[in-house]
Image (tube, coloured by chain):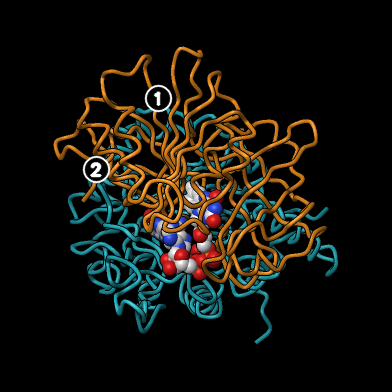
Amino acid sequence: MADLSVNLGGIRLRNPVVTASGTFGYGKDYLDLVPMERLGAITVKGVAPFASHGNPTPRTAEVFGGMLNAIGLQGPGIDKFLHHKDYMPFLRTVDTKVFVNIWGKKLEDYIEVASRLEAEPEGIAALEINISCPNIKEGGIAFGTDTKQAAAVVAAVRAATSLPLITKLSPNVTRIGDFAKAVVDAGSDMISLINTMPAMAIDIETRRPRIANVTGGLSGPALKPIAVRMVYEAAKAVKVPVIGMGGVSTPEDAVEFLLAGATAVGVGTAIFTDPGVLVRIVDGIDAYLERHGCKSVNEIIGAVRV
Amino acid sequence: MKHQVESQIIANRRIHGDYFQVDFNAPEIARAAQPGQFVHVRIPLLEHRVLRRPFSIYNVEPAAGTVSVIYKVVGEGTECLSQTPADTVASLLGPLGCGFTVPATADVQPVIVAGGYGCAATYLLARRSPRKPVCLFGARTEADLLLVKEFEALGCEVRIATNDGSRGHRGFVTALLEPFLKAAQPRPVAVAACGPNPMLKAVAKDLLLHGLDGEISLDHAMCCGVGACFACVIKRKSDNPDGWEYARTCIDGPVFPASQTVWD
Ligand SMILES: Cc1cc2nc3c(=O)[nH]c(=O)nc-3n(C[C@H](O)[C@H](O)[C@H](O)COP(=O)(O)OP(=O)(O)OC[C@H]3O[C@@H](n4cnc5c(N)ncnc54)[C@H](O)[C@@H]3O)c2cc1C
Ligand SMILES: Cc1cc2nc3c(=O)[nH]c(=O)nc-3n(C[C@H](O)[C@H](O)[C@H](O)COP(=O)(O)O)c2cc1C
C-alpha cells in the first residue's frame, strides 16, 4: 500500500479524494452509504449569510456525457448551518476533514459568512470561496469572470478569517492562469477548479429549455478534458496546491488530474451515479501507484511528461 | 438505514401493455422497506448516462430477499431496463424516502386512490394495513388498469373509474372518493394517493374541502435520491415569512401530507 496522504497547504489529507461542493449535501445524507473515514475531505454545499429558496424547477437535466444543473444554491443560511444538528454539529462528529464552501450575492455577504465561521471554527479545515456559481442571477458570476473583482472578494474574506482559504475558479474565462494568480496574490492559500460550465439544453417537442433557469452548469464526464487542461494551466501559473475536479468518475480520471498538477481531486456528479465510486477511486489510485512502483502519491503530482 | 446493493435481477417480464415487473435480489432492502419508499436504480444498459432512475417499491418478500418494482417504458432508461435479462447485476440504493403511514389499528378505514404505477406504490400499504383498504383506481381506459386482481387477492375492495367508461365509473377517480369524505362515514378514513399529478391535485383539493388530510406521493425527476443535491424539490407550506419552502421529494417525501403541498 502506497502512502496516499497529501499536504494541502498545511492541511494533511489521508488521501487526495474530496467530495465536490453541492454534490454531497452537508455529509449526513450519505452517512449510511459512504465510509467518511476513507475520504480525504468533504466539501459541503454552499453556505450564505441568509437562507435561500434556490431556483424554480426543473433544476436539472441529464445530457449526453453529464448533466446540467441550476439548483441556485438553496440553503439554510449561516445561523442554521452553525447550530442545527444536521449541519456543523454533525460535521464535527465525522472522521474526515471538512471544507465549508461559501457564497454571497455581494461582497459584504462573503465577509459576513466568513466572519461567522471564523468565530466558530471548530471542525472546519478550510473555507472554499465560490466566486463562480453560474446559476445565480445577481450572484457570483461577476466575481468569477473578472480578475479584479475575484481578487477583491478573496482579499475581503482573507481579512475576515485566519482559516485556510481555497478559491474555486470558474471555467468560463479565457486565461485561467491570470485568475489563479490574482486570487493567490489576494491571499488565497489554494485554488480549486473547475466549477460547472454554462450550458443549455432544449426540449425539441415543447421547444422549451429543459431547465427553468434556461441555462445551467454542465458537470460530469463531458467536462473532464477541459478541466484537465485548466488544472494543468492553473497549476503551472501558481505555486500553491490545486484541487482539480470536473468529470472525475474513475481512478484513472483522478490520476490524470494528479499528473496534470492537482494535489487533491474533487468528485461530484459521479457520486450521483454511484456513491461507491469515492472509495473505488481511493483504492484505484493506490493500485495505480503500486503498478508504477511509486511509494507515495506525491511522486505523481504534476508528473505529466510534456 | 439506506443500503447500496449490487443486486441480481431474478426476473424481468412484461405484465401488461408498456408495464413490466422486475424482481431484484436485495435482502437488505427487502427487510427494511416501508410502504411508499423507493429504490434508486443504476440501469446496467444505461451506463452512458450519469443518473439513476427512481422506482417505487411494489412488493418485498423479506424471507426470500426480493424487491419488486413495476415500471412503465417511457424513455431511454426504462426501455433499457425492459431489455435487461435475468441474472444481470444492477446497483440499487434503498430503501429511500419517507413513505405512507400504516394505520396502527383496524379502527381506521384506509382508502387508496391510485393510477398508473401509483397502484404498485401503494401495494405494500394495502398488504400491511390492519384493516384492508378500499382501493379507488383510475385509468384512461380499461387496458391501462394495473394490479386489480393482486389487490383483490389481499382482500381489498377495488372500485374503478375510467375516463372513457370502458370499465367501472365513467369519469375521474375523485368521484369515487367523494362518499368517503362525507361525515356520514362509520369510521375515520386514512386516504393515501399516488398517481399522475392532476389526480393528486384533485384528491388534495377534495380532502381539504372536507376539512380532512391525507397522504399523497409526489413524483419529480431526481438526481442523488438521498437528499444531497436539491434537484427534486416541490413547494411545501412553511411558517417562514414567504409561507412556503422547497422540500426534497427524495428525503422529505415522496409522501407528503396533502395539507402541506402548494400547487402553483
Ligand atoms: C419517487 C418516484 C417513484 C417512482 N416510481 C415509479 C414506478 O414505480 N414505476 C414507474 O414506471 N415509474 C416510476 N417513477 C418514474 C420513473 O422514475 C421515470 O419514469 C423514469 O425515471 C424515466 O426514465 P427514462 O430514462 O425511461 O425516461 P427519460 O428518457 O429520462 O424520460 C422520458 C420522459 O419521462 C419524463 N420523466 C423522467 N423522469 C421523470 C420523473 N421522475 N417524473 C416525471 N417525468 C419524468 C421525462 O421528462 C421525459 O419526458 C417514479 C419516480 C419517482 C420520483
Ligand atoms: C447538483 C450540483 C450542485 C452543485 N453545487 C455547487 C455549489 O453549491 N458550490 C460550488 O462551488 N460548486 C457546486 N457544484 C459544482 C461542483 O462542485 C463541481 O465543481 C462540478 O460539478 C464539476 O465536477 P463534477 O463533474 O465531478 O460534478 C455543483 C454541481 C452539481 C452537479
Q: CA distance from mark 2 to mark 1?
A: 21 Å
Q: What amino acid does circle 2 point to?
A: Val
Q: How many marks?
A: 2
Classify residue B63 by image quadrant. Answer: top right
User: As drawn, is B49 to the left or to the right of B237?
Assistant: right
Identify by letter the chain in cyan. A
Percent coordinates x, y for residue A153 in the rendering: 25, 59
User: As drawn, is A86 to the left or to the right of A291?
Assistant: left
Q: On the image, numbered disc 1 is attached to which residue?
A: B190
* Callout 1 crowding tier (Cα within 10 Å): few <14, some 14–19, many ≥20: some
Percent coordinates x, y for residue A65 in the rendering: 54, 75
Percent coordinates x, y for residue B223 in the rendering: 49, 56
User: As drawn, is A284 to the left or to the right of A185?
Assistant: right
Q: Vertically, is B179 above or below B142? A: above
Q: Chain of mark 2?
A: B
Q: Quadrant of the N terminus of chain B?
A: top right
Q: Vertically, is A241 above or below A32? A: below
Identify by letter the chain in orange. B
Percent coordinates x, y for residue A232 in the rendering: 54, 77
Q: What amino acid does circle 1 point to?
A: Ala
Q: On the image, numbered disc 2 is attached to which residue?
A: B262
Contact? badges 2 and 1 (CB < 8 Å): no
